[in-house]
Amino acid sequence: MENTLLTSTHEHFVPIDKSLIRSLRFNRVEPSNNQALQSKLEYAMRLGNTHHVKVRLYFSTLEGNYKVETTVWACDSTSVCLKGGIWIPLSHIRGVEFY
């Protein structure tokens, strides 16, 4: 697997603390058709659940573009759950990076 999957390399992503994600606003949530992203998130979920491996997620909100370093605990066709029960709509995730 390649190391990153970013839809735009020209966007600037601001680091954010995971606990602040709940205060962000997202556009309408739609199922994602991006199979490559879904596969990377499922892999990140397996690593997170078995070895507590963290990943860097890049995502967009109505407030801007952010990145967070966290463990992925669950994912489905509409969203990803981070450690601590924080959900991000899958359609807003712009990339996943393993480090």
Image (cartoon, helix red, strand yellow):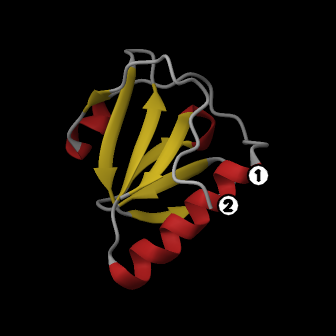
Q: Residue at x 56, y 32 (%)?
A: 92
Q: Classify residue 57 by image quadrant.
A: top left
Q: Which mark is residue 89?
A: none
Q: Classify residue 20 by image quadrant.
A: top left
Residue 68 placement (x, y as % from top left): 31, 43
Given the image, on which type of amino acid does mark 1 rest? Gln
SS class of the residue under badge 2? Answer: helix
Is 32 displayed left or right of 86 in the figure?
right
Vertical side of 4 occupied by 75: above or below: below
Residue 93 placement (x, y as % from top left): 54, 38
Is 15 displayed left or right of 24 in the figure?
left
Vertical side of 46 occupied by 75: above or below: above
Q: Check contact, mark 2 vs mark 1: CB within 8 A.
A: yes
Vertical side of 77 occupied by 26: above or below: above
Instruction: Give the CA distance from mark 2 to mark 1.
Output: 6 Å
Which residue is disc 2 drawn over?
A: 39
Which residue is disc 1 drawn over?
A: 35
Q: Residue at x 62, y 61 (%)?
A: 1
Vertical side of 82 occupied by 14: above or below: above
Q: Residue at x 35, y 62 (%)?
A: 71
Given the image, on which type of amino acid does mark 2 rest? Ser
Is 57 displayed left or right of 19 in the figure?
right
Is 50 displayed left or right of 9 in the figure?
left
Q: Residues within 10 Å of mark 2 (few under 14, many from 20)?
A: few
Q: Residues within 10 Å of mark 1 (few under 14, many from 20)?
A: few
Which quarter shows the C terminus? bottom left
Q: Classify residue 47 by image quadrant.
A: bottom left
SS class of the residue under badge 1? Answer: helix
Residue 84 placement (x, y as % from top left): 29, 60
Q: Residue at x 65, y 47 (%)?
A: 78
